[in-house]
Image (cartoon, helix red, strand yellow):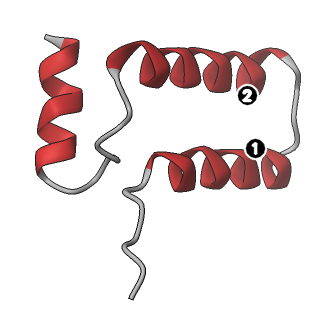
Amino acid sequence: MRAKLVAGAQQAGAVRDDAELPEVYALLVATSRAATQTHLDEEVRTRMLAIVFDGLRPLSTPG
């Protein structure tokens, strides 16, 4: 089921094609743990999430 979610997000253009379930899962687990267990302030947490989401976003084609 989870692999279908990643594949669906890729087909919709929301997640880069070279991201596979193990990497996406690891990023989500690590990010959620960091956000909840390290007592980050909201500004840091927001920037961290933006960086993770930017990293998952499809690569733009040069042109």
Q: Does residue 19 sit above or below 52 in this rendering?
A: above
Amino acid type at image mark 1? Arg
Q: At numbered mark 1, what does the secondary structure look like: helix, strand or loop?
A: helix
| Left or right, residue 35 beside residue 16 | right
Q: Residues within 10 Å of mark 1 (few under 14, many from 20)?
A: some
| Left or right, residue 20 beside residue 49 | left
Question: Residue 24 appears at what percent x and percent y?
Answer: 44, 25
User: Residue 4 bears which disc, if any?
Assistant: none
Instruction: Give the residue at x 84% y 49%.
Output: 44
> Which of the marked residues, 1 or 2, is nearer the chain's N terminus?
2
User: Residue 35 bears which disc, if any?
Assistant: 2
* Quarter of the image where one finds residue 34: top right
* Quarter of the image where one finds residue 18: top left
User: Residue 45 bears which disc, if any?
Assistant: 1
In the depicted view, which residue is nearer to us: 49 or 37? 49
Amino acid type at image mark 2? Ala
How many labels sit on residues?
2
Q: Which quadrant, please, contains the N terminus?
A: top left
| Left or right, residue 29 beside residue 30 | left
Instruction: Give the residue at x 40% y 70%.
Output: 60
Question: Residue 15 appears at what percent x and percent y?
Answer: 32, 46
Residue sticking out furthest to the front: 63
